[in-house]
Amino acid sequence: MSLDPRFQVTKQIEGRMLINGELRSSGNNSWLKSFCPATQEYLGRVPNASAEEMQEAVAAATEAAKSWRNTSQKTRVELIEAIAAALEARADEFAYIESLDTGNTHGPMKNDVHKAVERMRFYCGLAYEIKGMTVPSTPENIHLTLREPYGVVGRIIPFNHPIGFAASRISPALISGNTIIVKPSEQAPLSASLLAEICAELAPPGVINIVTGDRVTGDALVRDPRVKRIAFIGSVASGMAIQRAAAETCVKHVSLELGGKNPFIICKDANLDDAVKAATNGMNFGWQGQSCGSTSRLIIHRSQYEELSAKVVDRVRSVKVGHPLDPDINMGPVVSQAQYEKVLSYMEIAKEGGADLLLGGKALTIDGCPGGFFVEPTVFGNVNSSMRIAQEEVFGPIMSLMPYDDIDEAVDIANSTTYGLTAAVWTNDYYTAMDLSRRIEAGYVWINGIGNHYRGLPYGGYKNSGIGREEGLDEMLSYTEVKAINFAMGQAERAKNN
């Protein structure tokens, strides 16, 4: 099978990382190479930093933090706005390389860039909300609090939204007065090197450091005692490993936005066509289901199960799979061979576990995409909570349809996993909507909607889906520590001190 000439790689990236204002390669001449998951074409490479080079970045950030914490909010906002403008101007370039590097479809990846820019500007608007308070504890004294930066913070980025997370998550840390070290995913690192170019030109040395590398690189960041704040988005297993590693060197503030096995409950009174459309859109086929918020468990009343199953299958069948740059497709390849093998293994696990295969269930070969990691959009029916396919996050394009008999059972099914990131409820009944939103164990619940993240609304999970909240004022304040101050102002206090 020959390569489709429409999608041949036109530019290869010779990436560099950013340490202390300098764009550089790794001193050990070690590289991470990227290949397109759709065709296996070579895309480029970035440095695979050593633990010692990560320590250099931490030292640079530590030194820069001494002056950065004393800059004005105006100065911090101007830096973020400048980076956002530069990113926006190169949106097409970022979207192109991200689609090739991740396998995600081009339209959503371009939207990711624009969402990142919007979020950066949103945080600029929150800059003056980093406030302390006065506390009327006693009439004689003045009691107040200050919010102060941690100093150096580390941010570890996943592969599914590389620039979307890397760029937007720089903002709250810097605006809070911290310096930052960004560690991109080794599975999709190329866009980070483009971001490094922008930051090298605009940011003071050491304020923003972007260090590419593998797990050794990330472990050095997490363990360094000079880094007092770590934020991570990724899998539960990796999040738990980061918690352990961080605790072995010192006490750190660690926030984790982890995986999900997200339920979507369709109530009997719902508009079924709208609900099916929302549930399949929420599966995020544009990311091959490789999204922590994907609605992978669709919970359907038994009286409507046959009708809705057919509607879901018809809609998922219309998903077109192909090269991520093809404007006519809806889904590309999964990100890597390891992920490809994992998704295929879960298809077999589901079959062996007794789930009914309604659609898909195997690998795909796409003309013009030799060696691509393509799998079929897949739907399993009559899934119950005892099955592994209902309990474990696949991070692939697999939907499980789960029947229920009454609303209490629907809630039990929704809460039956160790995850609790998002959930959705589709109903026309206000009481049912509010009742279920309180009973479902998840950090983010959509009522008659799915997938959208609304500015200012905190995002994060219950249970093993994480700790901490992002995407709002909560995230910005999480990059500060609170200092309490007491002024002894009364005559009695002054007398005691004389």
Image: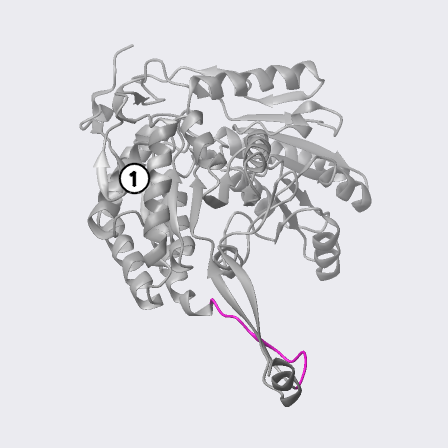
Q: Is mark 1 on a helix, strand or loop?
A: helix
In this rendering, would 384 be left or right of 475? right
Q: Name the residue at 43% across, 20% down.
A: 374
Q: Position of residue 241 (x, y in %)?
A: 57, 30
Taking the view exactly as shown, the residue that stands out farthest to the top is 1
Q: Name the residue under label 1.
A: 95
Quarter where residue 197 is shown: top left
**Magenta: predominant secondary structure element?**
loop
Q: Can residue 334 be seen in this view?
A: no
In this rendering, would 423 be left or right of 435? left
Q: Name the residue at 55% across, 45% down.
A: 252
Based on the picture, tell me whether residue 138 belongs to the magenta stretch. Answer: yes
Q: What stretch is highlighted in magenta?
A: 130-139
Quarter where residue 486 is shown: bottom right
180 or 440: which is nearer to us?
A: 180
Based on the picture, tell me whether residue 316 belongs to the magenta stretch. Answer: no
Amino acid type, mark 1: Ala
4 or 472: which is nearer to us?
A: 472
Taking the view exactly as shown, the residue that stands out farthest to the left is 10
Q: Where is residue 349 in the image (x, y as percent from the top left)?
A: 64, 16
Taking the view exactly as shown, the residue that stands out farthest to the bottom is 491
Q: Position of residue 39 (x, y in %)?
A: 31, 18
329 or 220: which is nearer to us?
A: 220
In this rendering, would 197 be left or right of 371? left
Q: Name the residue at 66% across, 87% down.
A: 492
Q: Where is residue 381 in the image (x, y as percent from the top left)?
A: 67, 27
- Answer above or below: position of 415 versus 319: below
Q: In which quarter of the image is the N terminus?
A: top left
Quarter where residue 360 is shown: top right
